Structure formats: structure tokens, C-alpha cells
Amino acid sequence: MFKGFRSFLLRGNVVDLAVGIVIGAAFTAVVTGFVTAFLTPLIGVATGAVGDFSKQAFTVADTTFPYGAFLNALISFLLVAAVIYFAVVLPVSKLQSRFNPVKDEPVAKTDCPDCLSTVPTAAVRCAFCTTELSGRPGFPTQVARADAEQGVHAG
């Protein structure tokens, strides 16, 4: 039992995922600290909150709503998302488009009328149940190569 658990933990993708989560949490803490230390006070100064917008709140029926803390979290989220998009997603997608060739157009597919497996529309036979597909609705009529060379069409 422990041998299987150990092999599960030592797989490459589990370790990579754990490292990614730890780094992501640390990065989020840095961004949240930056927002709390610099951006929130700037927003507070702009709105007249004496440089500390995070403590802003309003009260309704003796219930306090600390909307400044929510704005702190919202700004942190937007910054983390922006950094991830511009520092990770865009560069990786540009590298992939540069190094991966353009793939061919996807082949048109339809369901086999007998076994309902997905097969290419231009198929003559179903790869799953070997049903003859030529001439059936949704499939083009196929002409045998020898007949096509002679000008004779299969009927």
C-alpha cells in the first residue's frame, strides 16, 4: 500500500503541480503585499481616505461592510491575472506558434448510420463496424479507381 502511495507522490507531474502551487501562493502573497502597501494607499489618497483605503467601510442598520478589504482583494486578483497573462500565457503561446507548424484543417466527420461511431465523411467503410458507407445519406458516392479511369461509374 505504501509503495503505491510513494510511487504516486514521486511521479513528475505531482511534484511539478505541488511546486507550481507553492510558487503561485508565494507570488500571490507578494502581489497582495504590493497592493496593500502601494496601490491601496494611492487609491485612498485619490478618494480622500487619508492614504488607507483598505479600512474604508459603510454601515447599514448597525452592520459594517468593509468594502476597502474587498477592493484590496479585487486589485490583487487583477494584478495577478495580468502578470500571469502577460508574463506566461502570451510568451508561451508565441513560442508555441513559432515552433509548432500550422496544423491541417480538421477532417469533416459524421456518425456511422449503423454503429454511430464517428468516421470521416469521405470514408468508404466504417473503421469500427466495416459497414459500406458509399452512397448512404451524408456520405459522398465513391467511385472505384479502375472504373473512374475507364469512365464507368459504380451504381
Image (cartoon, rainbow, N blue to C red):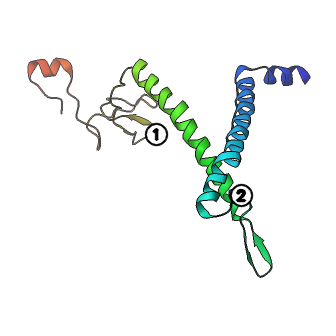
Which residue is at 11% across, 25% downward?
A: 152
Residue 63 x, y percent position in the rendering: 79, 75
Q: Residue at x 73, y 27 (%)?
A: 19
Q: Is residue 143 left or right of residue 3?
A: left
Tag 2: Cα neighbours inside 10 Å, few (<14), some, or many (≥20)? many
Residue occupying the point 18% across, 33% down: 155
Contact check, label 2 and label 1, Cβ < 8 Å: no
Query: Which of the 4 image quarters holds residue 50?
Result: bottom right
Does residue 49 lie above or below 29 as drawn?
Answer: below
Q: Is residue 17 above or below residue 43?
A: above
Please count the marks in the image.
2
**Residue 81 drawn above or below residue 148:** below
Q: Secondary structure at mark 1?
A: loop
Residue 39 lies, in percent from the top left, at 63, 49
Query: Would you place residue 146 above or below residue 129 in this image?
Result: above
Mark 1 highlights which residue? Answer: 115
In the picture provided, is 78 more to the left or to the right than 128? right
Closer mark to the observer between disc 2 and disc 1: 2
In front of the other: 25 or 104: 25
The residue where tag 2 is placed is 54
Give the crowd class for mark 1: few <14, some 14-19, many >=20 residues within 10 Å.
few
* Dot 1 amino acid type: Cys
Q: Earlier in the sequence, mark 2 or mark 1?
A: 2
Q: Secondary structure at mark 2?
A: helix
Pick the front one: 60 or 96: 60
Quadrant assignment for the N terminus:
top right
On residue 129, the disc is: none
